[in-house]
Amino acid sequence: MILAIAALLAATASAQRVPLGDEVLDKLLRQYDKDKDGKVQKSEYPRTAEAFANLDRDRNGVLDAADFEPGALRRPMRDPRGPEDKDKLPKVGSVAPDFELPLLGSKETVRLSSLRGKLPVALIFGSYT
């Protein structure tokens, strides 16, 4: 039974045509390359900066052939903070800055400092999508 399901899924996946990198680039160039230089600049791309960054695999600020080569790897995003910001970063073990947030499903709010010494608190930042 499991093999039959796996075979069906494999057949379905192979029947669906996934566009190749060149085809995606060609479509982007036709739609957005206003100056016809073979690259899509950020200023030419109408979607969000995040959408642009997802396509700009080599992080060079333009969408070009290198971004759509098979196996193109993403370079890690560079830290947007400059050297002048290093003094503003919290030190390990320092007290977190105080802030207030609404409680889910309520009109009440809670202030971080009100939890100090009472409950363990974990501050988690990131995307889970």
Image (cartoon, rainbow, N blue to C red):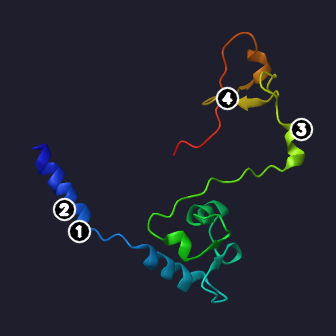
Residue, disc 2 = 11
Q: Mark 1 points at which residue?
A: 15
Marks 4 and 1 sit apart, C-alpha to C-alpha, by 45 Å
Q: Which residue is drawn at 14% across and 44% down?
A: 2
> Quick check: marks 4 and 1 in contact, CB under 8 Å?
no
Pick whichever of labels 3 and 4 is earlier in the sequence.
3
> Decide: marks 2, 1 in contact (CB < 8 A)?
yes
* CA–CA distance in space, label 3 to label 4: 21 Å
Question: At which x and y percent is residue 77?
Answer: 66, 54
Quadrant hosting residue 114 = top right
Q: Earlier in the sequence, mark 2 or mark 4?
A: 2
* Local secondary structure at mark 2: helix
**Nearer to the camera, 91 or 4:** 91
Q: Is residue 106 above or below residue 117?
A: below
What mark, if any, has residue 123 been given in the picture? 4
Badge 2: residue crowd in 10 Å (few <14, some 14–19, many ≥20) = few
Between 6 and 97, the residue placed more toward the observer is 6
Label 4's element? Answer: loop
For marks 2 and 3, give the one nearer the viewer: 3
- In this image, 117 relative to 4: left or right? right
Secondary structure found at label 3: helix
Inter-mark Cα distance, 2 to 4: 45 Å
Give the spatial CA distance, label 2 vs label 1.
6 Å
In this rendering, the answer to whether 127 lies above or below 44 is above
- Say which quarter of the image contains residue 88: top right
Q: Position of residue 106 (x, y in %)?
A: 64, 28
Which one is closest to the eye, mark 1 or mark 3? 3
Q: What residue type is labelled 3?
A: Asp
Residue 87 is tagged as 3
Residue lying at 80% horizontally and 49% vertically, measured from the top left: 81
Marked residue nearer the N-terminal end (1 or 3):
1
Tell me the quadrant of the picture where the N terminus can be found.
Answer: top left
